[in-house]
Image (cartoon, rainbow, N blue to C red):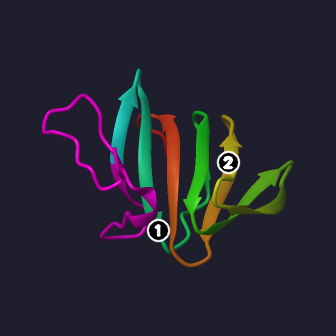
Amino acid sequence: MTRSASIPPRAPCSISHGRSFTADRPWGAKHIATLNGIYVRLHWTDQPYHWHINDGQEVFTVLDGIVDMHYRVDGITQQVRLLAGDIFHADIGCEHVAHPQGAARILVVEQAGSD
């Protein structure tokens, strides 16, 4: 099957092309799946998110672009640059904010209703 092949309507699967996904606003998302109360979403953004503290675990995977992730450990702000393929895991209580450097596509896995 080639990349351009389409899946028949009502198929029990779907394809999302992360590198070409865009949204109508920063942090706009395409909902991919809900797995036992866990959301899997594809986000597009060209703007920072806001500082927040996780109330559940989060897996943040950069699919395309560059994201500078700022996070606090013992009150000290640290930063790591995430490139395509890099994964940031935020546990419960992790305070962090993502700053994309230009446009970025991010796959986020987190509990439903998390901030």
Dividing the image into 4 quarters, which one contains the N terminus? top left
Q: Which mark is residue 4?
A: none
Q: Which residue is mark 1?
A: 45
Q: Which residue is mark 2?
A: 87
Q: Residue furthest top?
A: 36
Residue interval drawn in magenta = 1-30
- Percent from the top left, x then y, of residue 70? 73, 62
- Percent from the top left, x then y, of residue 52? 60, 53
| Above-or-below relation of 31 to 20 | above
As shown in the figure, which amino acid type bears the numbered disc 2?
Answer: Ile
| Above-or-below relation of 90 to 50 | above
In this orientation, does residue 54 appear? no
As shown in the figure, which amino acid type bears the numbered disc 1?
Answer: Thr
Determine whether, in the image, residue 91 is placed left or right of residue 22.
right
Closer-to-camera residue (24/62): 62
Q: Kindly indicate the quadrant of the structure image that contains residue 35.
A: top left
Secondary structure state at the residue bearing disc 1: strand
Residue at x 86% of width, y 48% of height: 74
Mark 2 Cα within 10 Å, few/some/many (few <14, many 20+)? some
Closer-to-camera residue (71/35): 35
- Percent from the top left, x then y, of residue 109? 51, 39
In this orientation, does residue 17 appear? yes
Closer-to-camera residue (84/41): 84
